[in-house]
Image (cartoon, rainbow, N blue to C red):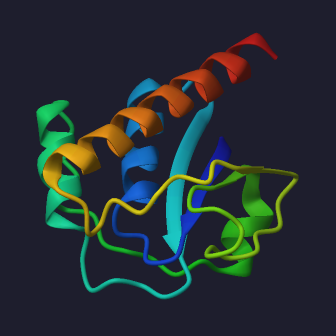
Amino acid sequence: MKVVLFACVENSFRSQVAEAYFNKYAPKGWTATSAGIKLADRVNPNAIALMREEGIDISHKKPQMLTPDLQTTAEIAVIVCGKAACPVVYAKRVEDWNLPDPAKMSIDGARKVRDAIKEKVLRLVEEIKES
């Protein structure tokens, strides 16, 4: 099984949303995980609510620490928060999506970030399928 790792600081919103979308649309033989370096206590309630709108339940998810093992087993690592704020990640391939932090946004602002994540994940899935 090939792994895509979505990384950000707290692993409470952007990376959790990206992981959930990728796993919903994952090409055969692929899966996703997510992690952070300064973990939040829980997944952001707005992330849970916004993913519920998409028919995806992430209420059971917990933030997890970004470990060397997660990095070395990932085929692709995606830094969702921009290199200035986010962890340095080592993987075979690293992408930087530089998405704004929706944690303190209104639900409508956070929805726009969620939708941007979905678009990027779907593009990544298509790229993987074509390779």
6 shown above or below 117: below
Q: In this view, does 28 lie to the left or right of 17?
A: right
| Residue 129 position in % (x across, y down) | 69, 15
Question: Can residue 70 be seen in this snapshot?
Answer: yes
Question: Can residue 28 be seen in this snapshot?
Answer: no
Q: Quadrant of the N terminus?
A: top right
Q: Which residue lies furthest to the right in this view?
A: 92
Q: Which of 96 and 6 is in front in this view?
A: 96
Could you tell me which residue is drawn at 26 percent across and 69 percent down? 104
Q: In which quarter of the image is the C terminus?
A: top right
108 shown above or below 11: above
Could you tell me which residue is drawn at 64 percent across and 28 percent down? 124
21 shown above or below 49: above
Q: Is residue 93 left or right of residue 40?
A: right
Numbered marks: total: 0
| Residue 36 position in % (x across, y down) | 52, 76
